[in-house]
C-alpha cells in the first residue's frame, strides 16, 4: 500500500522526477564505465605480465632475485621441468639462462639482459613469438640468431639481418663476446621490457659463458588457470625447498599492487559519485515534502501515524534512487559490453601507455559481482538520502500544516 502510494507520488511532478532520474542514471553509468575501463586496463596488463613477461610462476636459486648473479644457477633443470610439467594444473614449463650483458653495434651500445631459451619450449610459455613485427622466430638461419625488442632496435639503429655483439663474462670471470644475427624484432605493450630483453638459443649461449648442460637460472611455469597460482606455488615449494618459487605478483610487485588496490580505488570513486547524487536526491525530496506540507498534515490529522509517514517518504526516495540506479546499471553495463567488443583506441597516446606497460587499445570489462555491489550502494544511498526529508515530514504538526497555503 505504502509502496504503491509512494510510486504514484514520485510522478506527480513528472519533469522534476525525470530530471533527477536522468542525473542518477548518468552518474551510475559514468561510474560503471569508469570501473569497466580501469578493470579492463588492469586485466590486460596482468595478461601481458603473465603471457609475455613472467608466466604464472618462476623458480630460481634462493638468492637470485636479490642478487642476479650468473653463478646462481641450479642443476638437473631438465628433470625438474619434466616433473613440474606432469602436474595437472600446469600447462607448460620452460628453462632459461639469464645473463646481463652489453649489446654493441658500430654506432652505439647499451645494457641488456640475455635470455637463453629453447625456442619451441618457450613458445608454450610466452607469446613473444606472436609479437614479431619483423623477421621470424629463430628460423631461417644457422648462425647465432637473436630476437630483440623494437625499442632496442631503434636505440641501436639496427634491423633484421644486422649483427650485434654481446659482451659478457664467463662463469670463470673472464670477458668474452658473441656475435649474433638479428632474425626477428618483437614489440610488446611494455617499452621497458622491449628495450631491456633479448632472446637467444640456450645452445648458443651456454658454450659462450661456459655453463654446463642441464643447468638453468630460471624455470618459467605457465598454468591452466590463474586461480591455481597459490596452490601450485605451495606444491612446488614443498617439492624444491632449496629453491625459490615465486608467483607473478611477487616477481612484478607493481602489477600485483595495482590489482590489489584497484577494488579500493574504484569503491571510493563510486562512493564520491553516489555522495554527489545523494545531495541531489535529498534536495529533490525535501522540495517534495515542503510542497506537500498541507497534504501531509491532513494525512496525519485523519490518523496516519509517524512511522507510516516516515515509511512513505523513505519509500519515495528509495524508489527514485533505485529506478535511476537500475537504469544506470543497465546502461553502464551495456556501454562496457559494447566497448569491450570494439575496444577504445588510445593509440594517439601509445608512447606514454607503452612506457607504463599498457596496451594502447583498452577493452573495458566488469564482473557481475561488482555490479551487485554498486546496486547495494545505490540502495544504501537512497536510504541515507531519505532520512532527512522523512524526518522533516514527521516533524510537521497537523494543526499548523493545515493552515499552510501552498
Image (tube, rainbow, N blue to C red):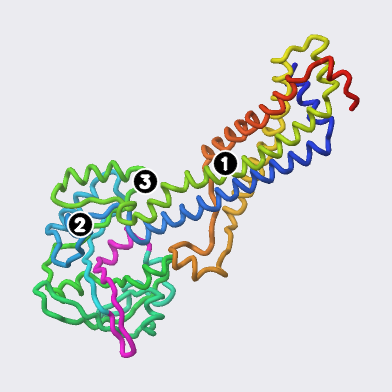
Cβ atoms at labels 3 and 1 below 8 Å apart: no
Query: Neighbour class for label 2 at 10 Å: few (<14), some, many (≥20)?
Result: many
For disc 3, the marked residue is 225
Compared with 399, 404 (above or below) is: below
For disc 2, the marked residue is 60
Query: Neighbour class for label 1 at 10 Å: few (<14), some, many (≥20)?
Result: some
Compared with 176, 235 (above or below) is: above
**Magenta residue span:** 103-127
Do we see residue 315 in this rendering?
Answer: no
State which tag comes first along the sequence, 3 or 1.
Answer: 3
Q: Nearer the viewer, residue 89 or 173?
A: 173
**Residue at the (33%, 71%) spot, across then down:** 196
Residue 80 % position (x, y): 17, 53
**Alpha-carbon span between mark 2 and mark 1:** 43 Å
For this orientation, the residue located farthest to the bottom is: 106
For this orientation, the residue located farthest to the left is: 172
Amino acid at each position: 500500500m505504502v509502496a504503491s502510494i509512494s510510486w504514484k507520488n514520485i510522478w506527480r511532478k513528472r519533469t522534476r522526477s525525470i530530471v533527477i532520474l536522468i542525473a542518477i542514471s548518468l552518474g551510475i553509468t559514468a561510474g560503471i564505465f569508469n570501473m569497466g575501463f580501469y578493470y579492463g586496463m588492469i586485466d590486460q596488463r596482468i595478461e601481458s605480465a603473465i603471457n609475455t613477461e613472467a608466466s604464472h610462476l618462476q623458480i630460481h636459486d634462493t638468492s637470485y632475485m636479490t642478487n642476479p648473479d650468473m653463478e646462481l644457477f641450479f642443476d638437473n633443470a631438465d628433470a625438474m621441468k619434466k616433473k613440474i610439467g606432469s602436474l595437472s594444473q600446469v600447462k607448460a614449463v620452460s628453462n632459461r639462462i639469464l645473463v646481463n650483458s652489453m649489446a654493441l653495434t658500430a654506432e652505439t651500445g647499451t645494457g641488456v639482459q640475455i635470455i637463453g631459451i629453447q625456442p619451441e619450449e618457450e613458445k608454450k610459455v610466452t607469446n613473444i613469438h606472436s609479437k614479431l613485427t619483423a623477421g621470424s622466430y629463430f628460423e631461417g638461419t644457422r648462425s647465432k640468431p637473436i630476437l630483440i625488442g623494437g625499442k632496442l632496435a631503434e636505440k641501436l639503429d639496427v634491423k633484421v639481418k644486422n649483427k650485434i655483439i654481446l659482451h659478457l663474462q664467463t662463469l670463470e670471470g673472464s670477458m668474452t663476446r658473441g656475435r649474433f644475427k638479428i632474425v626477428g624484432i618483437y614489440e610488446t605493450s611494455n617499452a621497458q621490457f622491449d628495450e631491456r630483453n633479448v632472446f637467444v638459443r640456450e645452445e648458443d649461449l651456454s658454450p659462450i659463458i661456459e655453463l654446463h648442460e642441464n643447468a638453468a637460472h630460471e624455470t618459467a611455469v605457465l598454468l591452466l588457470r590463474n586461480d591455481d597460482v597459490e596452490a601450485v606455488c605451495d606444491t612446488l615449494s614443498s617439492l624444491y625447498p632449496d629453491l625459490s618459487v615465486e608467483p607473478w605478483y611477487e616477481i612484478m610487485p607493481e602489477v600485483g599492487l595495482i590489482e590489489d588496490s584497484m577494488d579500493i580505488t574504484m569503491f571510493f570513486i563510486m562512493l564520491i559519485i553516489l555522495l554527489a547524487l545523494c545531495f541531489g536526491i535529498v534536495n529533490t525530496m525535501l522540495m517534495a515534502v515542503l510542497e506537500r506540507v498541507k497534504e501531509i498534515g491532513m494525512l496525519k490529522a485523519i490518523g496516519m501515524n509517524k512511522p507510516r509517514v516516515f515509511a512513505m517518504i523513505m519509500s519515495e526516495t528509495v524508489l527514485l534512487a533505485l529506478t535511476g540506479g537500475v537504469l544506470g546499471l543497465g546502461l553502464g553495463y551495456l556501454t562496457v559490453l559494447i566497448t569491450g567488443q570494439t575496444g577504445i583506441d588510445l593509440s594517439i597516446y601509445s608512447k606514454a601507455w607503452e612506457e607504463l606497460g599498457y596496451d594502447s587499445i583498452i577493452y573495458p570489462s566488469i564482473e557481475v559481482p561488482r555490479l551487485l555491489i554498486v546496486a547495494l550502494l545505490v540502495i544504501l544511498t537512497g536510504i541515507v538520502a531519505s532520512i532527512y526529508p522523512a524526518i522533516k515530514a514527521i516533524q510537521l504538526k497537523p494543526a499548523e500544516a493545515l493552515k499552510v497555503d501552498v
